[in-house]
Amino acid sequence: MKKKISIIGCGAIGSELAQHVDSNMTKNVTLLSLLDIQSENAQTLKSKLSNSSPLIFNNFADFVESESFKDIELVVEAASQNAVTSYLNQLILFKKDVLVMSVGAFANSEFFSEVIKNVENNNINIYVPSGAIAGIDALKSVKNSISYVTLTTTKNPKSLKDSPFFKQNNLTVDSIKKRTLIFEGSASEAVKNFPANVNVAALLGLAGIGVDKTKVNVIADPSIRINKHEIKVIGKFGELIVRVKNIPSSTNPKTSYLAILSVIECLRSITTKGLKYGT
């Protein structure tokens, strides 16, 4: 039996995932609908699909009131932190499992507590892929023995230019001439300043010692064309260092291609029975 899914957000991640499902590479999944507040995004994506004919929505109320909604077993969020805070708790109350990409929304402790309470009361699952980083399995294993976690993210200024941090500090792409440390702070602060760029910081915090204790450095480097993440964890267990160099998505430089592959693998794992790898 195929798991029926819907995708919220038809940008780089949502589009790649929909096309992957459409090609039957994830054999146990069928795509019922697409939701994007920019209806042309969903229409464009639908036109690229050969084997699927998902319903299109540009309004969340219409989406949940539709006849097809009752058949959906899993909703994939690939839109934004704002989409998570706006829709997630409602989806949980409708008893829908949800795969969340914009995990930065969980850096808000009050919102996260409400989500956890609703998940427990409604007996559903929230899935969070590893995204553009690696080492989450190891981090979860040692979380009770950690004294220090830091994430250093290095990106081309072009992929950071639309962030609140750039706007608040009157930064432009041309104003950064060389490799520059532009932000130091906690993971909770980082995801507010760079909501489309460092969602992985929130994931590190949730898997480890918390978003307020997890430290983040953001470096803007005009000489690079890839996205770099370095994670350093120190504790009683020893030391863990993970370095990842990601090729940006061809359609959105803010998104690493690894993040797209991660959500595809997470969906495959959810819908496949048998041998599982990792914790």
Image (cartoon, grey):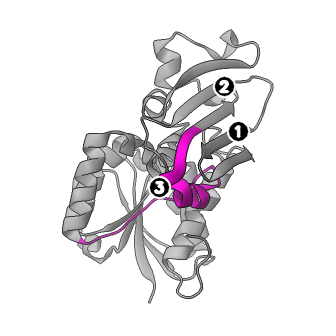
Name the residue furthest right. 223
Q: Quadrant of residue 64?
A: bottom left
> In which quadrant is the N terminus drawn?
bottom left
Residue at point 47% right, 77% down? 30
- The answer to which of marks 1 and 3 sits earlier in the sequence is 3
User: How far, Cα to Cα, is label 3 from label 2?
Assistant: 36 Å
Q: Which residue is mark 2?
A: 219
Question: Where residue 101 sits in the image (x, y, percent)?
Answer: 47, 53
Q: Nearer the viewer, mark 1 or mark 2?
A: 2
* Viewer-nearest residue: 107 or 32: 107
Identify the residue at horizontal 62%, vertical 44% (top origin).
233
Amino acid type, callout 1 = Asn
Image spot of residue 227 (x, y percent)? 70, 38
Q: CA distance from mark 1 to mark 2?
A: 10 Å
Dot 1 falls on a residue whose secondary structure is: strand
Foreground disc of the pair 1, 3: 1
Mark 3 nearby-residue class (10 Å; few <14, some 14–19, many ≥20)? some
Q: Is residue 195 left or right of residue 250?
A: left
Callout 1 crowding tier (Cα within 10 Å): few <14, some 14–19, many ≥20: many
Q: Which residues are magenta?
A: 123-149
Residue 200 visible from this viewpoint: no
Task: Rate crowding at label 2 as few (under 14), some (14 to 19) or many (20 or more) other CA atoms within 10 Å.
Answer: many
**Callout 2, which amino acid?**
Ile
* SS at badge 3: helix
The label shown at residue 227 is 1
Q: Is residue 118 visible?
A: yes
Judged from the image, the secondary structure of the residue bearing numbered disc 2 is strand
Look at mark 3 in the image and give the residue it sits on: 43
Tell me which numbered mark, 3 or 2, is placed earlier along the sequence: 3
